Image: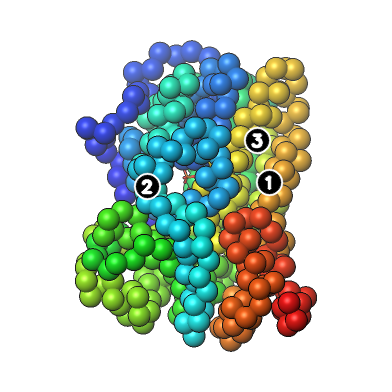
Amino acid sequence: MGNDTAERTGADSIDQIAIEDLPSRAWDFIIVGAGPAGSVAAMELSRMGHSVMLVDRHWFPRTKICGDCLTPGAMRILQRLELYDVARKEGFHCSSMSIFSPAHIRIDVPGDYLTVRREILDQLLVRKALDMGVTFVRATAEDLEERAGQKVRVRFREGDAGHVARCCLLATGGGLSLARKAGIMTHSVASGAAVRCYVRSKLPLDRLVVACEPSVLPGYAWIFPVGTNLFNVGCGRFMYGHGESHINLHRIFRTFLEEFPLAREMMAQGKVETPLKGAVLRSGWQQAGPIAHGPCLGLGEMIGTTSPYTGEGIGKAMQSGVLAARLGHRCLLTGDMSTLHRYPTYLRQLGGLRYEGFKRTRKWFRRPWLVDFLARRINHSPYLYDAFASILQEKSDPAQVFSCRGVWRSLWR
Ligand SMILES: Cc1cc2nc3c(=O)[nH]c(=O)nc-3n(C[C@H](O)[C@H](O)[C@H](O)COP(=O)(O)OP(=O)(O)OC[C@H]3O[C@@H](n4cnc5c(N)ncnc54)[C@H](O)[C@@H]3O)c2cc1C
């Protein structure tokens, strides 16, 4: 679990200061966690004229366990941040995605798909934040202390006194210990877990592949090209409660490599380049309990912004960064920190997540025969095919497809 590197890597490193070298001063915002959620919030706040300290426990660039695939929502934000062109140059572009049902019925969905390795993407985001005046620091935040509801002191493992800010944003990803200390998060059950590794192979594949193998359901495995002859390969499972914490994803992944024809072909022409590593996924923010507490907000994966259907969370993490920044700015502008309690209302703007529809979808994924049946219907019904394609484009509610009504309509459309 966790990230692959914690050491400073030299040549590629960016302007990140050790906390011990940072003179003490008061900040408008301290943002803990420089993943997509934290970096985007930092950029937005700095653009609005605030002093911002962005802090991460790793020296950058650092790797992050991820499938590296950007959803249309993520691409839209990158466009807004004027980072899309450079991300596309650094990443791998595909114009089709193939989804395989348990019985290997294939659905091809043309589209604009982009993969960017996370050490590259997250570095691009942090660089942009630095360009906008953010101070980027290396330190591990360990504790928070509210000061009369108007300020917060963040303590770090390195150094003693900590740093004070008018508002603190927590964007620590899957890790909840800091959130719990801040009293932000009460819902601690992960909604899924996933593993991935990189495979170097001569397999001529220029599309994204998603496989709903029987051994992986309820969940899916993927083969995503991320560069010439390089693939991000992994699998993830939905979890429905504490009872499923025993799932052995390493074994499921091995079965996938042995049983899925394209994976077998890929392995016959190549080899695994990095160890298989995993992390939890957190979805369903509406169950997260109080998400605004004192002058402190949680954002990104930490509060469960990741899609419970696809496991994709980069775009939603960035969107939550924008929303938290907007609200934080408003509070500091008016001096009324109680406005932070409107955060849940702000987050509802992430309605594009359509969590309820997604949750229903997960039930369908428990039955291989149902997924096969649906795959056949999608290939036969233009109505269902279009609806399915528009879910992948994050334009419609999954309940349109994964519902009795959806299947019923597909019988004559
Ligand atoms: C195997 C796997 C595959 C996935 N594939 C995809 C995909 O293809 N597409 C997609 O969109 N999403 C994918 N996801 C989900 C995606 O990775 C997350 O939703 C996304 O990274 C969340 O962003 P974030 O900014 O909230 O958190 P993160 O990206 O996790 O960033 C959190 C940051 O906080 C730092 N941090 C943590 N604790 C502290 C602390 N105490 N002090 C200082 N710093 C701290 C960490 O070092 C890290 O840099 C995948 C997840 C997994 C596990």
- According to the picture, the residue beneath numbered tag 2 turns out to be 91
Mark 3: amino acid: Leu
Relative to 324, does residue 277 appear above or below in the rendering? below
**Which of marks 2 and 1 precedes in the sequence?**
2
The residue under the point 47% across, 39% down is: 84
Label 1 C-beta lies within 8 Å of the nearest ligand 1 atom: no
Residue at image coords 49%, 32%: 82
Helix, strand or loop status at disc 3: helix
Q: Horizontal and vertical percent for residue 384?
A: 67, 72
What residue is pinned by disc 1?
350
**Quarter the C terminus occupies:** bottom right
Residue beneath the point at 63% across and 71% down? 385
Q: Which amino acid does label 1 sit on?
A: Leu
Q: Pointer 3 and pointer 1: residues touching (CB < 8 Å)?
A: yes
Local packing at callout 2 (Cα closer than 10 Å; few below 14, some 14-19, many 20+) is many
1 or 2: mark nearer the eye: 2
* Residue 140 in sight from this viewpoint: no
In this rendering, would 135 be left or right of 44?
A: left
| Residue 206 point in image, percent of width and height | 36, 62
Q: What element carries label 2?
A: loop
In the rendered image, which residue does mark 3 sit on? 323
- The amino acid sitting under disc 2 is Gly
Query: Mark 1, residues whose alpha carbon is within 10 Å: few (<14), some, or many (≥20)?
Result: some
239 to 179, vertically: above or below: below
On residue 106, the disc is: none
On-image quarter of the N terminus: bottom left
- Whole-percent x and y of residue 100? 48, 76
| Disc nearer the start of the sequence (3/1) | 3
Determine the residue positioned at 44% across, 28% down.
128
Horizontal side of residue 258 vs 384, given as left or right: left
